[in-house]
Amino acid sequence: MSLAERCALFTGKSATETRDFPAYGIDSLRMTDGPSGVRADLAEGAGSRSLCYPSACLLACSFDRDAARRTGQLLGRDGRARGVDLLLGPAVNLKRSPLCGRNFEYYSEDPCLTGEMAAAFVEGVQESTGACAKHFAANNRENKRMSVDCVVDKRTLRETYLSSFRRIVKKSPPDAVMTAYNRINGEFAGENAYTLEQVLRGDWAYDGLVVSDWGAVDDVVASVRRGMDLEMPGNSSAARKLERAVKRGDMTEERLTERAAEALRRADAVRARRCKADFDGEEALKALADIAAESAVLLKNEGELLPLRGAKRIGIFGELAVKPRIQGGGCANVATYETANIERAVRERFADCECVFSLGYAEGAEDGEALVREALETARTCDACVVAMGLPESYESEGYDRTDIEIPPEQTAFLRRLGEVNPRVAVLLYGGSMISLDFERYARAVVMCYLGGSATGLAAAKILSGDTPPAGRLAETFLYRKEDASCHPFSSPDSDVEVYGEGLFVGYKYYGAKGTAVRYPFGYGLNYGRAEYEDAEISEDSVRLTLVGDPRYDVRETVQIYVGFPDCGYARPIAELKEFRKVTVPRGERVTVEIPLGRDCFETYDAAADAMTVRGGRAVIGVRRNALEVVAEKTVVLEGEKGARYDRNTLIGELLKTRAGIRVIEEKLKGHLIRAILGNFRADILPMKDGRAIGHDRFNSIMESMPLRALVNLTGGAFSEEEMEEIVDGLREGE
Ligand code: BGC
């Protein structure tokens, strides 16, 4: 290939294709969005229709890797059947702010849940089509997304914003990773020396295709140098810039050729996935309806109003029942077929009941009062009322952020008046992100249905009938006020710089530490029926417990394992989700589950090594029903990773964290410590237990903050430099 051709490899041919070079046997790759369905209109032209899949915000609430894998499988086959090589999804940025316009496309405020669910989704997609995890990284707001500089410390990046990508890359490497629009600590994500070159390409040895977000590239030469393989969409000046850089000597021709060969090899790996795939849209829709219903979160259900059993006359209300919100706006938006709306699907499922519909509210209605009155008349004689409500389409989209967390006031006003004439009200709530639930007091039952795609209507019927009960858990905290959000003090809607001042304390990790009252915590959700927990046995290798079934319902329970690190040496959240399992507990039965805990459950960031590591010390492992409700807890003592440094500046407090360290204190240091702190060398005057002087808290406090080297000075050399070195060596060997 000529130099010009080699340079042209780094940029696309069109908005959705890479360049082909028939003379060299190089075929184009076809790409399209995305996470919530094949954007056939983009790939095939206007008029093309596709199935719309449940958005990630809903799928995440299933806490069910199998559901994510199945959804991915269907989407992959759907894409492959339409000739797509690379699906531009999943989108795995964290819901750092409840106001981010694109939250509907993202999974969660938690990196473990995001990473695990997205890895399973990628695994499913890649049975037939390539997947592209996006947007790498720290793309957590839409306002000024193409220029904002996200200032994030390395610990927070590694433990939070990069962590979900790391799980995916480790567990189920996607064929591609898309870099984000924003800057990270001053450098654009697409040319970032730290996140792209050092972490993704270096530390994680990611060898897939790195593609820019559409229109994100600022300096194509820097991007190619740092590891980007493809600038999208196609743009002829990119190739010319690269050629010029080589001619000017800014990049050697050898280096460019090497990079071109890599880019080609990575694109070949995507092409190698090509296979024959059949796709049956009808079958897929049925499967997605079950997934959407089961992922929905039952927030309240007073007097067991749901499932609707024994109702003879069911009232269905709300504009969203006939014009449902099924997806978010922007590039994830799929031109889809007409499928059953909520009103029609409920009517069909409850064919043996009388189902009556009245709007009650409608966006921009001329005579809102008339709509309310008419609906109230209908409602008076119903055994149960179902109201579909939530965020209108214009409230959330790619490209801009929300300004608050409220739904339109006419919806709340209608619900209040409805509750006054008929208290048996169930709300089906739609939207892609957290919503203020001030209205919930007017309803006996509330189900957060998020955005269910083409299956939204069918899923609503399954939820209300109990054919497929809602069993989701919130993947984000529901707050009372937007001002309570963890990022709130550090975030302003139009700033050019977004300082991630809350650090590791994102979402529930902040509310737990600060004691902020929340409406519904992360991980929260009810079931029809309830499983109880018994006999939890917790160790650092696994959690084993028995779930006792409900006598009346089969329950799909979500076991959540959280870990806290009181000894990690820096301020951090009390408990972080590290594992979870969806378990079916048949009615009246007992099910015992064992959940293995990998070493990665205990990793924290080691600043000196700029890497994740397991440090020795205590870890609190807890089984929780949600982020706040502890079922059982146990403290274990972890042995540290080899290489976790001990040196002359190691504090005695650090030694207290391991059994080996405690032995050193009791057997070798005790006398010296007494001399250094009390000026007395009689080791027998302070009896010790577990490395601490019994009944001498002040002594212990002083001791804990003392570095080993200080013992040499403070004992006048009685504790020698050589002895200290021997102890440090011994501790290192024992690691
Ligand atoms: C979005 C990406 C998307 C791309 C192509 C961009 O605006 O940020 O997520 O894949 O467009 O449609």
Image (spheres, grey):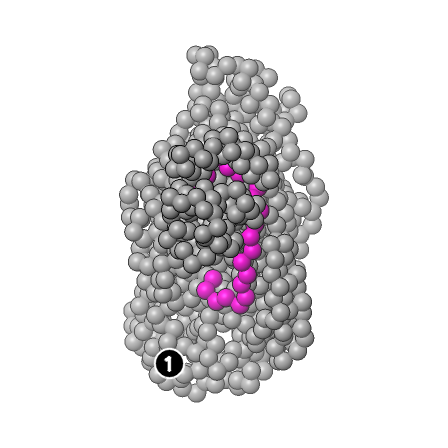
Q: Nearer the viewer, residue 156 or 582?
A: 156
| Farthest right residue in view | 276
Task: Indicate the amino acid at tag 1.
Answer: Gly
Q: Which residue is mark 1?
A: 419
| Residue 489, position as x, y percentages in the image | 29, 51
Q: Residue at x 45, y 52 (%)?
A: 685
Quarter in which the N terminus is drawn? top right
| Farthest bottom residue in view | 381
Q: As drawn, is 124 to the left or to the right of 497?
A: right
Q: Residue at x 39, y 55 (%)?
A: 697
Magenta segment: 627-652
Q: Nearer the viewer, residue 639 or 424?
A: 639
| Residue 704, position as x, y percentages in the image | 42, 47
Magenta-span inclusion, residue 650 = yes
Label 1: element kind: helix
Q: Nearer the viewer, residue 188 or 76?
A: 188
- Secondary structure mainly formed by the magenta segment: loop
Q: Nearer the viewer, residue 361 or 449?
A: 449
Magenta-span inclusion, residue 447 = no
Q: How many marks?
A: 1
Q: Is mark 1 within 8 Å of ligand 1?
A: no
Q: Residue at x 71, y 44 (%)?
A: 276
Q: Is residue 377 visible?
A: no
